[in-house]
Image: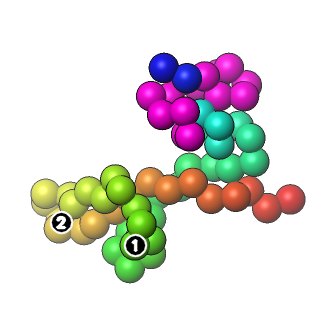
Amino acid sequence: MHFCKSKKHVWSSKKDAEKCCNGYERVMVFGDDIPPNAKNVQINSDTGIKFSRIWVKVSD
């Protein structure tokens, strides 16, 4: 387990921990907005809609 910079959140992935509270935020994207390299794509069983959570750089 890895803590983020603020020590408020715990992640199983070191890469996720390095981004959390360090200039990035995790957002949910749907359908065609999902990047081709996303590894955690899920499909809602009721609606069939694809979604994923990705990191995006926070703008200043």
Does residue 42 appear left or right of residue 13 in this picture?
left
Locate the C terminus by quadrant: bottom right
Bounds of the magenta span?
3-16
Residue drawn at (72%, 28%) of the image: 5
Contact check, label 2 and label 1, Cβ < 8 Å = no
Residue 12: name its quadrant.
Answer: top left
With 8 as the anchor, is 38 left or right in this view?
Answer: left
Q: Is mark 1 on a helix, strand or loop?
A: loop
Q: Does the magenta stretch include residue 59?
A: no
Residue assigned mark 2: 47
Q: What residue type is labelled 2?
A: Thr
Q: Which residue lies furthest to the bottom in this view?
A: 32
Residue drawn at the location 74% of the way across and 41% of the way down: 22
Mark 2 lies on a secondary structure that is loop
N-term mark: 2 or 1: 1
Q: Residue 36 has which mark?
A: 1
Q: Measuring 55% from the left and 40% from the top, which residue is drawn there?
A: 16
